Image (cartoon, rainbow, N blue to C red):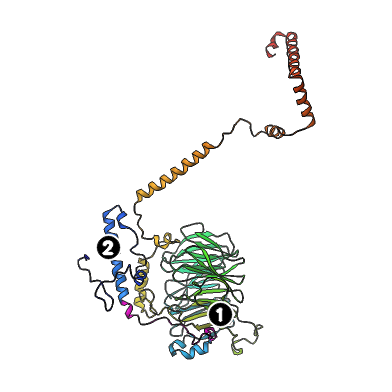
């Protein structure tokens, strides 16, 4: 194989003396991610072919390097394994899990009893280091989840519907009663007020596009560029208030859950939804999508959880829960968390096991929330015996932890096998220094994707049309064939007698009377057939004689009118 000058030798697997064909190896194709797809021979320009060839060669070298470094990835995602066929993993409690893990992992499971401001919503940063909590009555707090330290704490005095970190942990967006506010998570100072986002209910942030997405009571979905401060797009869904708002992690498409049971997919480049799925008979409570962007889970008020294949828009499975599911989330390793009243369930294998029925066969872990002790409640609390219900569940990135926001505060649960064991520190580093954070922010600004790159098919970005002229000819031929077929069909149809006045009311009435059979008409037709038309000729003769007589009696000046 001919190598480029100065290129390093291709890496090899341990124990092998030859280069690995990454396109034939199953693991190699995973690292390639379709980078070498396409036929370069059809490209019309030689320079483009050379550029594509070099790009594909660099992708192959990177895939070989990743394949050779797999031996260094000693960590693996482990799950709770039953010792016998009759044992069930969901019977294992959180106390037993904490007793079975090391001290650092056990410290990740804790409870915060915040009974005066619930229910709570939450959000983690991409590296799983920081946690943001937002209470319905206006309490907002930012915590360092790794060191268990409190950052900033605010009491806004008005309802908080959602919280969302922006490009890093320094800025926090809060959906309040009237507008979206941005706060400094270190000092708690208000940085900005986004008045174009009226009455928001749900927030999402696109890290590669630096766009803040909001859905509100008015039914509008809006995109705001946080790097320039400009409102990119605002479209009305015409379906009422926003019930759920999530994003496709692979393409950036916004998933908008509606009260009529429809989940629509929106992009700032299109004023109409890219696709719409009728998922439930009732309102959509929440939606969640895996990290691969292939499977979508929807939860409705009808107590049904459905699994959809986004590539074909087909429903793969319909599962019934014990009660209506209010919140969903998918972990890095594909575990599905559900908030069902006061119970939190974690399903495993939900995207691969199709069919209908109960979701109990998929239950991996289960936890029941309990009310806060009496010492954490106010003496005047009229709901001291109320039931606790889950309001928001979110997996902590890169960790085996599930955060649950409920009416009595916040709970962090241990879920073995939920987090990514071998994370990419260049993508999300929980141990990054302030200098690394600043550099990552600069790189994000330099590599920011434009809003028009958000589409259902993310692979179209960077693609090359093989032959634009041939493609134009194909489109033109298809249009001409369609026009030719339309003309032939029009010529084959019988022609119509288009007379003037065909739409007059007298013509319509005459046409209606043609097929009407009455007694008088039948008598006149019978008389005409009997005399053979003699009566009509006599009548015409009498009429001509009368006209001649009137013309002779008339003055000469008006005889020309007879």
Quadrant where the C terminus is found in the figure: top right
> Magenta: predominant secondary structure element?
loop
Q: Give me the residue at 36% from left, 77% from top.
A: 425
Q: Which residue is mark 2?
A: 54
Is residue 72 shown in magenta?
yes
Residue 119 appears in view: no
Q: Which residue is mark 1?
A: 344
Coordinates of residue 55 in the picture (x, y in percent): 29, 63
Quarter residue 304 falls in: bottom right
Is residue 92 shown in magenta?
no
Quarter residue 515 falls in: top right
Within 10 angstroms of label 1, few (less than 14), some, or many (20 or more) residues?
many
**Which sits in the foreground, 526 or 410?**
526
187 relative position to 260: left or right: left
Q: Give me the residue at 30% from left, 60% from top.
A: 52
35 relative position to 390: left or right: left
On screen, 204 above or below 507? below
**Which sits in the foreground, 360 or 272?**
360
Coordinates of residue 178 in the picture (x, y in percent): 56, 68
For label 1, the SS is: strand
**Which sits in the foreground, 268 or 67?**
67
In primary-sequence order, the first of circles 1 and 2 is 2
Which segment did they paint magenta? Answer: 69-91
Quadrant where the N terminus is found in the figure: bottom left
């Amino acid at each position: 194989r001919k190598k480029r000058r100065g290129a390093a030798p291709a890496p090899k697997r341990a124990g092998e003396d030859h280069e690995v064909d990454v396109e034939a190896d199953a693991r190699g194709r995973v690292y390639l991610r379709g980078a070498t797809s396409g036929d370069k021979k059809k490209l019309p320009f030689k320079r483009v072919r050379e550029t594509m060839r070099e790009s594909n060669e660099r992708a192959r070298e990177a895939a070989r390097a990743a394949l050779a470094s797999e031996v260094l990835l000693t960590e693996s995602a482990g799950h709770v394994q039953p010792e016998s066929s009759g044992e069930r993993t969901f019977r294992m409690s959180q106390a037993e899990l904490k007793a079975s893990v090391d001290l650092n992992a056990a410290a990740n499971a804790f409870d915060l009893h915040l009974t005066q401001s619930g229910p709570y919503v939450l959000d983690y940063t991409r590296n799983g280091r920081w946690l943001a909590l937002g209470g319905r009555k206006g309490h907002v707090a930012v915590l360092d989840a790794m060191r268990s330290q409190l950052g900033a704490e605010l009491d806004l005095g008005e309802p908080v519907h959602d919280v969302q970190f922006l490009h890093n942990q320094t800025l926090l967006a809060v959906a309040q009663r009237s507008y979206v506010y941005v706060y400094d998570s270190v000092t708690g100072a208000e940085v900005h007020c986004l008045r174009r986002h009226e009455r928001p209910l749900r927030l999402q942030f696109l890290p590669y596009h630096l766009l803040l997405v909001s859905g509100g009571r008015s039914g509008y979905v809006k995109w705001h560029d946080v790097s320039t401060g400009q409102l990119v797009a605002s479209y009305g869904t015409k379906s009422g208030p926003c019930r759920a708002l999530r994003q496709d992690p692979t393409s950036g498409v916004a998933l908008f859950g509606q009260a009529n049971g429809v989940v629509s997919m929106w992009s700032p480049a299109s004023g109409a939804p890219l696709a719409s799925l009728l998922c439930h008979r009732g309102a959509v409570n929440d939606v969640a999508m895996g990290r691969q962007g292939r499977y979508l889970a929807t939860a409705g008020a009808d107590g049904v959880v459905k699994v959809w294949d986004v590539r074909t828009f087909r429903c793969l499975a319909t599962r019934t829960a014990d009660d209506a599911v209010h919140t969903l989330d998918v972990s890095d390793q594909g575990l599905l968390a559900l908030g069902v009243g006061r119970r939190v369930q974690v399903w495993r294998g939900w995207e691969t096991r199709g069919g209908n029925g109960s979701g109990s066969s998929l239950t991996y872990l289960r936890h029941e929330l309990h009310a806060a002790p009496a010492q954490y409640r106010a003496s005047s609390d009229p709901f001291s015996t109320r039931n606790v219900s889950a309001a928001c569940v979110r997996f902590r990135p890169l960790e085996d932890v599930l955060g649950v926001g409920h009416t009595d505060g916040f709970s962090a649960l241990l879920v073995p096998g939920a987090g990514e064991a071998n994370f990419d520190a260049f993508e999300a580093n929980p141990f990054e220094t302030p200098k690394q954070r600043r550099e990552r922010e600069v790189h994000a600004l330099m590599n920011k994707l434009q809003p028009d790159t958000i589409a259902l098919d993310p692979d179209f970005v960077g693609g090359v049309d093989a032959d634009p002229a041939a493609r134009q000819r194909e489109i033109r031929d298809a249009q001409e064939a369609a026009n030719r077929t339309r003309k032939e069909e029009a010529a084959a149809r019988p022609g119509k007698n288009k007379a003037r006045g065909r739409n007059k009311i007298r013509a319509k009435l005459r046409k209606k009377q043609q097929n009407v059979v009455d007694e008088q008409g039948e008598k006149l037709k019978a008389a005409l057939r009997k005399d053979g038309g003699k009566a009509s000729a006599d009548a015409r003769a009498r009429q001509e004689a009368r006209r001649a007589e009137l013309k002779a009696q008339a003055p000469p000046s008006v005889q020309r009118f007879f």
